[in-house]
Image (cartoon, grey):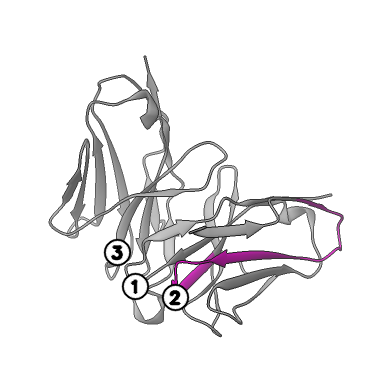
Amino acid sequence: RKEVEQDPGPFNVPEGATVAFNCTYSNSASQSFFWYRQDCRKEPKLLMSVYSSGNEDGRFTAQLNRASQYISLLIRDSKLSDSATYLCVVNKGYGGSQGNLIFGKGTKLSVKP
Amino acid sequence: NAGVTQTPKFRVLKTGQSMTLLCAQDMNHEYMYWYRQDPGMGLRLIHYSVGEGTTAKGEVPDGYNVSRLKKQNFLLGLESAAPSQTSVYFCATADSTYEQYFGPGTRLTVT
């Protein structure tokens, strides 16, 4: 099993749609989870951290399921500006490697008018 | 605040040449990272540092060396560049939350 695995995409959705991304991770000791977005030819930018209780930021909701080792990102009321690649990030989670973050390959989202 | 900066932004090297990429941060973060990003491969960790004077290997360290002599700077060196090192290189920093902040990237071509 890959350390961090994401839906391959691409996801092509109309404006206003709700879209969900899933990500699975292999290391049960991982403690830190994030979603980043990356626009074409730009650096990744932190979208949100993912907490055990789940968290919401406007149209974005992130959830963590430790038992099944997956995290999800839900985007409601999609905007054209949401078009980007979404990266799932998980830390290695043990000893001195806690700062070592593993990135998924990303899922590309394209929101159409 | 500049955040995280990288120099240079672009570089073309010939095989066998050497160069150093500089990452600088004014965020007072302990953690610093160097990644490379290639099409279809996602971001791969080259080396990282958990504090001044420390470095550790990531997923793809071969052919690269790093140094963290000052907290605010993290240098990535290529001693003898190879075409396989053609990539986009990103530097990132993080505090104890591990939330990473990235620089704008360096596009390196090795011919």
Q: Position of residue A102 (x, y in %)?
A: 43, 60
Q: Are marks 3 and 2 on the same chain?
A: no
Q: Which residue is mark 2?
A: B30
Query: Mark 1 and 3 residues: CB-CB less than 8 Å, in contact?
Result: no
As measured in the structure, the alpha-carbon distance from the residue carrying label 2 to the one carrying label 1 is: 8 Å
Q: Residues within 10 Å of mark 2 (few under 14, many from 20)?
A: some
Q: Residues within 10 Å of mark 1 (few under 14, many from 20)?
A: few
Residue B82 quadrant:
bottom right
Question: SS class of the residue under badge 2?
Answer: loop
Count of numbered circles in the view: 3
What chain is tagged by disc 2? B
Secondary element at image label 1: loop
Q: Amino acid at mark 1?
A: Ser
* Of the image marks 2 and 1, the number of the one nearer the N terminus: 2
Which image quadrant is residue B44 in?
A: bottom right
Q: Are marks 2 and 1 in contact (CB under 8 Å)?
A: yes
Mark 3 surroundings: few (<14), some (14-19) or many (≥20) residues within 10 A: many
Residue B11 lies left or right of residue B92; in this view the side is right
Relative placement, left or right, of A108 versus B41 is left
Of the residues shown, which amino acid type is indicated by label 3?
Ser
Does A73 appear in magenta? Answer: no
Q: Is residue A1 visible?
A: no
Q: State the image quarter where residue B67 is shown.
A: bottom right
Q: Residue at x 20, y 54 (%)?
A: A64
Question: Which residue occupies the foreground of this view, B90 or A63?
Answer: B90
In the foreground, B45 or A78: A78
User: How far is the residue under mark 1 from the one under mark 3?
Assistant: 11 Å
Which region shows up in magenta? B11-33
| Location of residue A10 with respect to B34 vertically, above or below | above
Q: Position of residue A101 (x, y in %)?
A: 42, 64
Q: Residue at x 44, y 75 (%)?
A: B30
